[in-house]
Image (tube, grey):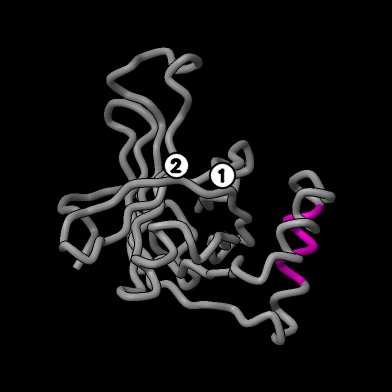
Amino acid sequence: MKTITEFLDGYQSVVLGTEGSNGYPFSSYAPFYYDGEQVYIFISNIATHAKNIQATPQASAFFIEDENTSKNIFARKRITLQCDVSSISRDENTFANIMSHFQDKFDADMVNMLMGMKDFNLYALKPIYGEATFGFGEAYNIGGEKMNELVARTGGTGHK
């Protein structure tokens, strides 16, 4: 069984879908780190998507192949994850561990500067269900014990 890690390794940002206070969907993006189980984002409270997930702790995480490198604009490789969101306090051991990965993945000086800003918070997006498409006829559901495996689609959408 393949995991989604192989696909996500080539990405630095995730497109987020959150629910606005007016009930409408809101799309934005954030740099992320994926540990093989959860997607982590470090975002400012000033950002609309932060306010949205604080009010409604659910989000979609969308990763899509760059249209300039895709062989077929109609069949771009993509993964969509529907997630429950939780905040990780700066006091938790998890915070320092995950932020060290952000420092390794991105400009460490920039990450350190953002960590000094108290309005930035770390969030964990835990996949509840998802879908992956890697071309025509290559559709998968996201499953497995840690919701990180590509499961060949046998019918239906795979979600609740």
Q: Quadrant of the C terminus?
A: bottom left
Q: Is residue 39 above or below residue 86?
A: above
Residue 141 included in the magenta stretch of the image: no
Which disc, if any, is residue 63? 2
Q: CA distance from mark 2 to mark 1?
A: 8 Å
Q: Is residue 149 above or below residue 65?
A: below
Residue in the image at 55% along x and 61% along y: 44
Write the start and end of the magenta stretch as one range: 97-103
39 vs 70, left or right, is right
Q: Secondary structure at mark 1?
A: helix
Which amino acid type is marked by label 2?
A: Phe
Counting from the top left corner in percent of width and height, residue 35 is at 64, 62
Q: Dot 2: few (<14), some (14–19), or many (≥20) neighbours within 10 Å?
A: some
Overall secondary structure of the magenta section? helix
Q: Is residue 21 above or below residue 141?
A: below
Q: Are the residues at dot 2 and dot 1 in contact (C-beta closer than 8 Å)?
A: yes
Q: Which of 109/87 is in front?
A: 109
Residue in the image at 33% along x and 34% along y: 138
12 vs 87, left or right, is right
Residue in the image at 62% along x and 36% along y: 10
12 vs 73, left or right, is right
Counting from the top left corner in percent of width and height, residue 49 is at 40, 58
Which amino acid type is marked by label 1?
A: Leu
Q: Secondary structure at mark 2?
A: strand
Q: Is residue 7 above or below residue 92?
A: above
Q: Earlier in the sequence, mark 2 or mark 1?
A: 1
Counting from the top left corner in percent of width and height, residue 103 is at 79, 54
Residue in the image at 69% along x and 80% along y: 90
Residue with the mark numbered 1: 8
Q: Dot 1: few (<14), some (14–19), or many (≥20) neighbours within 10 Å?
A: some
